[in-house]
Image: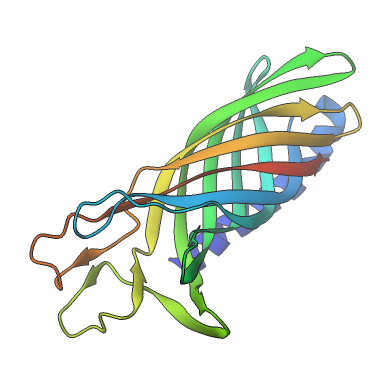
């Protein structure tokens, strides 16, 4: 699956490169690079059904997208991002969960003239695949790092002390921002996960866990 995502990204990149000559003539199709900060948390319920009480984790994202015109002032904007998500839980023992994803957003974008630039607003789904993660547990002067394990289900033979995530995630994006005449743009992003991040766990007979990624972020980018 990781290979397929990277292949998709390469196809998008090559398509953008081949379209650059068209871009120079029409000024419509464009290629953008972007990066920024994520403020992410994990919401939902634990295995007993109790509400999670997590804090925001400060992380980051980076990648590129292609903007393809589909109607006057409307564009289809597929992209490929590396995005770090997770959550913090602070108390006597502090836990920071960081999970890395390769993410494919598929957004519909409206760009309206505003001053010398454009007001932009967009929305659409995303799909992502987990490629790594770490849970850091700190208490006093002691600190312990454990790796995140990606599995579709947890069996009785699997260690109960490990942290498990589903490899796949999907949800929705909404963002708004401004693109300057020279191509520099910034935007505020919000994101809501629709799939459970936690796999089914055979260690719990009545497992009520339902954990989802939720957050927002700020992006700065440049469109060619």
Figure label count: 0
Q: Is residue 19 visible?
A: no
Quadrant assignment for the N terminus? bottom left
Side of 223 where 73 appears, left or right: left
Residue nearest the observer in this picture, 18 or 81:
81
Quadrant assignment for the C terminus? top right
**Percent coordinates x, y for residue 118 in the rendering:** 79, 21
Side of 160 where 75 appears, left or right: right
Dividing the picture into quadrants, the one containing residue 62 is bottom right
162 relative to 208, above or below: below
208 relative to 161, above or below: above
Dividing the picture into quadrants, the one containing residue 21 is top right
- Residue at image location 25% in from the left, 80% down from the top: 160
**Percent coordinates x, y for residue 47 in the rendering:** 21, 60
Furthest toward the left, the residue is: 205
- Residue at image location 36% in from the left, 43% down from the top: 194
Side of 90 where 71 appears, left or right: right
**Percent coordinates x, y for residue 132 in the rendering:** 50, 72
Q: Is residue 211 visible?
A: yes
């Amino acid at each position: 699956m990781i290979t397929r995502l990277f292949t998709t990204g390469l196809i998008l990149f090559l398509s953008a490169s081949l379209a650059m000559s068209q871009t120079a003539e029409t000024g419509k199709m464009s290629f953008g690079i972007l990066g920024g900060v994520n403020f992410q948390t994990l919401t939902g319920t634990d295995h007993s059904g109790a509400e999670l009480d997590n804090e925001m984790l400060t992380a980051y994202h980076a990648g590129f997208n292609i903007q393809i015109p589909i109607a006057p002032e409307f564009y289809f904007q597929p992209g490929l991002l590396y995005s770090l998500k997770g959550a913090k839980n602070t108390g006597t023992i502090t836990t920071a969960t960081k999970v890395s994803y390769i993410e494919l957003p598929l957004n519909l974008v409206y760009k309206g003239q505003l001053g010398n630039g454009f007001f932009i607003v967009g929305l659409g789904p995303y799909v992502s695949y987990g490629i790594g993660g770490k849970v850091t547990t700190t208490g006093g002067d002691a600190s312990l790092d454990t790796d995140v394990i990606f599995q579709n289900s947890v069996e009785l033979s699997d260690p109960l002390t490990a942290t498990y995530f589903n490899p796949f995630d999907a949800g929705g994006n909404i963002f708004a921002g401004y693109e300057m005449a020279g191509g520099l743009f910034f935007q505020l992003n919000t994101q809501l996960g629709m799939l459970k991040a936690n796999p089914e766990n055979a260690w719990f007979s009545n497992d009520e866990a339902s954990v989802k990624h939720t957050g927002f972020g700020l992006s700065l980018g440049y469109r060619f």
